[in-house]
Image: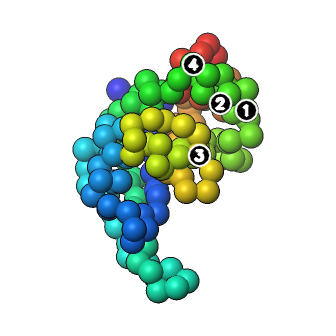
Amino acid sequence: MKGPVQSVEVSLFVHATEDLPRVAGAVASALSVAVPPQEERLEGHFGNQIVLVKWHLAGDEAMAAVAALASRLTPAAKRRLGGGLAGLVDEHSALYLRFDKQCLVEGRLEEGGRDSVRIKVKPRGFMMKAGASEFYSRVLLGGGG
């Protein structure tokens, strides 16, 4: 049986001053990702190297990433996210989250700002009987709905 999440996309930028294997490994570990990422080499404004790192997960891999994410959220983070879920969902019911990349490398999962790991969770439409906020509250935050 297929889970309630269709896919998860994870992306981040790794700058020339950062250790690419360490950063990508920390993100993969935090989200229980076993597949290698796609990497795209870019050039910054001043000629510095930037690597766009992406994972596209589907099926069991996507569900494992959501479960890992949910298990790492602190109760306070769950309350903050739960209170603002509607503002994080687009017109196609995809959920967009950002977590601080440096904190994640240090083993902590904290909501992020400028230098963040971006996560897009796409649901299976037929699994959303009560609406997007209730769906994500149940699937990601462990709430009722």
Q: Which residue is mark 2?
A: 81
- Give the residue type at disc 1: Gly
Q: Which mark is residue 75?
A: 4
At 52% from the left edge and 85% from the top edge, which residue is drawn?
46
Using the numbered discs, state the Cα–Cα distance from disc 3 to disc 1 in whole angstroms: 15 Å
Q: Of label 1 and label 4, which has the lower sequence position? A: 4
Left or right: 50, with 130 as reference point: left
Q: Given this view, does label 1 or label 4 mark the residue nearer the observer?
A: 4
At 44% from the left edge and 80% from the top edge, which residue is drawn?
48
Judged from the image, the secondary structure of the residue bearing numbered disc 2 is helix
Closest to the observer: 35 or 27? 27
Give x and y (percent) for residue 85: 69, 33
Using the numbered discs, state the Cα–Cα distance from disc 2 to disc 4 in whole angstroms: 10 Å
Judged from the image, the secondary structure of the residue bearing numbered disc 1 is helix
Q: Which residue is mark 1?
A: 84
At 39% from the left edge and 53% from the top edge, which residue is drawn?
56
Q: Of label 3 and label 1, which has the lower sequence position? A: 1
Q: Given this view, does label 2 or label 4 mark the residue nearer the observer?
A: 4
Q: Given this view, does label 3 or label 1 mark the residue nearer the observer?
A: 3
Q: Which residue is mark 3?
A: 112
Quarter of the view holding residue 65: top left
Q: Are marks 1 and 2 in contact (CB under 8 Å)?
A: yes
Q: Are marks 4 and 3 in contact (CB under 8 Å)?
A: no
- Give the residue type at disc 2: Leu
Q: Residue furthest bottom?
A: 47
- Give the residue type at disc 3: Gly
Quarter of the image where the N terminus is located: top left
- Give the residue type at disc 4: Pro
Category of crowding for the residue at label 1, using alpha-carbon neighbours closer than 10 angstroms: few (below 14), some (14–19), many (at least 20): few
Using the numbered discs, state the Cα–Cα distance from disc 1 to disc 4 in whole angstroms: 15 Å
Using the numbered discs, state the Cα–Cα distance from disc 1 to disc 2 in whole angstroms: 5 Å
